[in-house]
């Protein structure tokens, strides 16, 4: 079975057990995609684009590409574990902005004491002289599982 078929089969089974996750599949001849919209203004959209040789994960304005170097099944399981955490307060997207435009994004996980960067992306060209700010987005569709922290008071650690 190829990567798009395997991903869709595994994903359909996982999502069938979690009816609270609003999602949409798009199937094409050479691949498929899975989209999960943010359910609040403080959340972030998640999208997987699955091709025959790789999966691209979009998190808010940013993306990360994954290839099945350890095998298709292992990659799919790892990505659905990551998705589960991205749908909870255990993970967030933190964006550094210049002016009102993001120029660097971090996908971060919380261990109960600190935020740690899991993935990072940045623009090559951006408004260096723009006023700097930080925006954070977090989903709460599923409950937290990685930490027992009270997320209302979780510290915002800047890197």
Image (cartoon, helix red, strand yellow):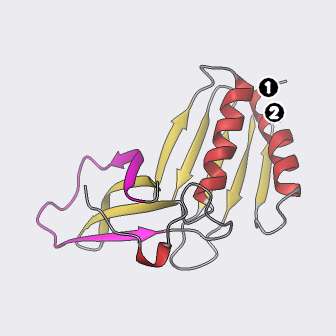
The reply to whether residue 78 is in sight is: yes
Drawn side of residue 149 relative to residue 23, left or right: left
Q: Residue at x 85, y 24 (%)?
A: 1
* In magenta stretch: residue 86: no
Q: Residue at x 69, y 57 (%)?
A: 35
Is 34 located above or below residue 139 in the figure? above
Q: Secondary structure at mark 1?
A: loop
* In magenta stretch: residue 124: yes
Range of the magenta residues?
Answer: 113-137
- Please state which of residues 134 and 90 is positioned toward the viewer in this rendering: 90
For label 2, the residue is 6
For label 1, the residue is 2
* Callout 2 touching callout 1 (CB < 8 Å): yes
Res 153 quadrant in image: bottom left
Q: Residue at x 51, y 68 (%)?
A: 138
Drawn side of residue 132 relative to residue 77, left or right: left
Res 29 quadrant in image: top right
Is 31 located above or below residue 102 in the figure? above
x%, y% of residue 26? 78, 52
């Amino acid at each position: 079975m190829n990567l798009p078929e395997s991903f869709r089969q595994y994903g359909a089974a996982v999502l069938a057990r979690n009816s609270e996750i609003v999602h949409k599949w798009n199937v094409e001849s050479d691949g498929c995609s899975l989209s999960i919209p943010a359910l609040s203004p403080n959340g972030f959209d998640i999208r997987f684009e699955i091709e025959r040789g790789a999966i691209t994960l979009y998190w808010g304005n940013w993306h990360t590409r994954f290839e099945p170097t350890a095998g298709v099944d292992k990659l799919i399981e790892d990505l659905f574990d990551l998705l589960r955490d991205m749908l909870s307060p255990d993970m967030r997207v933190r964006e550094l902005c210049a002016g009102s435009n993001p120029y660097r994004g971090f996908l971060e996980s919380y261990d109960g004491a600190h935020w740690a960067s899991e993935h990072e992306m940045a623009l090559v060209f951006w408004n260096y002289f723009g006023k700097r700010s930080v925006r954070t987005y977090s989903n709460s569709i599923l409950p937290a599982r990685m930490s027992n922290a009270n997320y209302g008071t979780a510290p915002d650690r800047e890197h």
